[in-house]
Amino acid sequence: MITLPPDYRPSDDEEFMNPMQVEYFREKLLKWRTDLLKEAGGTLASLSEGGIHEADVTDRASVETDRALELRTRDRARKLIGKINQALQRIDNNSYGYCEETGEPIGLKRLEARPIATLSIEAQERHERMEKIHRDD
């Protein structure tokens, strides 16, 4: 088990996905997942507070809107947690940080911004162009 110095940040000066970098991203992913689960717990508690007791139609509509937003947020969090779990699996099988399409390193800046990324910037842009072309059909 690797213990990271508190001020450690991955750098391009070191070998890509060396044990320190892998541990850094593992901890980042685990913390993100924990935060999402905590938020989801709060959302669940507020959703389970029961039915809508507002007498006023406007208040009732407002509560309904809030509830729909919370459910959408929860669904988004659930999907993100799934992607975080997949990223943690990639760490375990040593494929984390490498593009699924090209096998090239994804890059530290991209992983720092989006630790669940599975494609390099170039491959992601290609995907988006293809989606746009097919959408326009």
Image (cartoon, grey):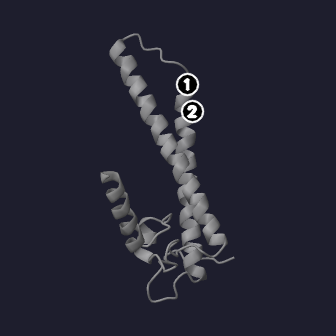
As rendered, which of 35 and 95 lies closer to the eye? 95
Q: Is residue 90 left or right of residue 109?
A: right
Report crowding for label 2: few under 14, some 14 to 19, many 20 or more residues within 10 A (C-alpha): few
As rendered, which of 58 and 2 lies closer to the eye? 58
Quadrant of the image containing the N terminus = bottom right
- Name the residue type under label 2: Ala
Q: Quadrant of residue 12?
A: bottom left
Residue 79 higher or lower than 92, as above or below: above
Residue 3 higher or lower than 116, as above or below: below
Residue reaching furthest to the top = 55
Residue 30: % across, % down:
59, 61
Task: Tell me what residue is drawn at x 32 percent, y 52 percent.
Answer: 137
Task: Tell me what residue is drawn at x 42 percent, y 35 percent.
Answer: 69
Task: Tell me what residue is drawn at x 55 percent, y 42 percent.
Answer: 40
Residue 93: % across, % down:
66, 73
Q: Is residue 58 left or right of residue 53?
A: left
Numbered circles on residues, count: 2
Q: Quadrant of residue 2?
A: bottom right
Q: CA distance from mark 1 to mark 2?
A: 7 Å
Q: Is residue 134 left or right of residue 102?
A: left
- Name the residue type under label 1: Glu
Report crowding for label 1: few under 14, some 14 to 19, many 20 or more residues within 10 A (C-alpha): few
Q: Residues at badges 1 and 2 in contact (C-beta under 8 Å)? A: yes
Task: Tell me what residue is drawn at x 52 percent, y 74 percent.
Answer: 97
Badge 1 is on which residue? Answer: 49
Residue reaching furthest to the front = 137
Residue reaching furthest to the left = 136
Residue 129: % across, % down:
33, 63
Badge 2 is on which residue? Answer: 45
Residue 122 higher or lower than 66, as above or below: below
